[in-house]
Amino acid sequence: MKGVRHYPGFLPMAVGCLVILYAPLVVVMIYSFNGSTSITTWGGFSWRWYADVFTGPEAPRFKAAAWNSLSIALIAATTATAIAVAAAVAMIRGGRFRGKSATFALINLPLMVPEIVVAVACLIFFSTIGLTTGYLTILLAHITFCIPFAYLPIAARLQGIEDTYEQAARDLYATRGQAFRLILLPLMMPGILSGFLLAFIISLDDFIITNFVKGAGMETLPTAIFGSVKQGIKPNIMAISTMMLAVSVFFVTLSYLVNRIGQRTRS
């Protein structure tokens, strides 16, 4: 049986898709090291725009926005991961119960609904209950849409763990809590770490939902970049975008490696 790469036209189509997706990112990375103030004319290799991000006139704004992004991502990922662990244990170890299919669909709903719809729904909900938009509303919205991203790796890991380990612990007079804490939780840890990292980077990079629920005077790093771009694309924006790209690639790669290590350990 032939692999997909042997079908006529597959290779050029794949190369074309990769070029369309990644060529703009490569251009941004290259011109972030441009010594010229122009974003189209190469003026030699320089680190000046990376230094400008930390010491330039917009540095205080970017630092405050970066702190908001990091703190929100950390809290949102931690909370979403804790909820995802409880949900995965209930869905996979809880047996059959009424509304299980509906619960599974509800957990994964943020993955299927367009992000703009989630953003509008969150804004309407916060306005209805009288909650002032700001740090708290961003945090609540991020927790909501990060849950399915944390749930998927955790559930996949838990499905590969046989329940005989827990049964053996119960046979040795361990309580349900002890069996979970001492047996199941350590076995789930690669999936939990992978889910946490994925939720963290999803929250850190989010723009659409954040832009709807952030309120006046509140900025995260993506919204701060967007605000600067509206005034014109400057080389320092390319530098900060490259740094965000590097952080995203790092966390996604780390999540992948943790998941692979967990699979090897399981096998």
Image (cartoon, rainbow, N blue to C red):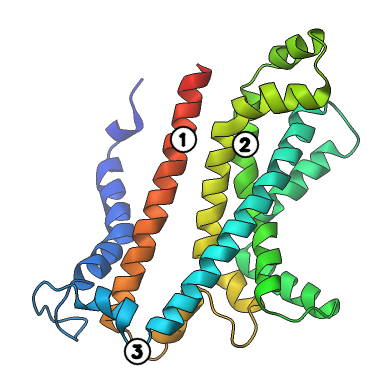
Amino acid type at mark 2: Ile
> Residue 89: in sight, yes or no?
yes
Look at mark 2 in the image and give the residue it sits on: 154
Q: Quadrant of residue 47?
A: bottom left
Nearest-to-viewer mark from 2 and 3? 3
Is 156 in front, or is 175?
A: 175
Question: Mark 1 or 3 closer to N-term?
Answer: 3
Q: Is residue 68 left or right of residue 105?
A: left
Look at mark 1 in the image and give the residue it sits on: 258
Q: Is residue 127 left or right of residue 148?
A: right
- On screen, residue 93 above or below 148: above
Give the residue at the far bottom of this rendering: 231
Q: Quadrant of residue 50?
A: bottom left
Q: Is residue 165 left or right of residue 50?
A: right
Question: Where in the figure is residue 188, as x and y percent of width and height?
Answer: 61, 30
Give the residue at the far right of this rendering: 98
Look at mark 3 in the image and give the residue it sits on: 57
Disc 1 and disc 3 in contact, CB within 8 angstroms: no
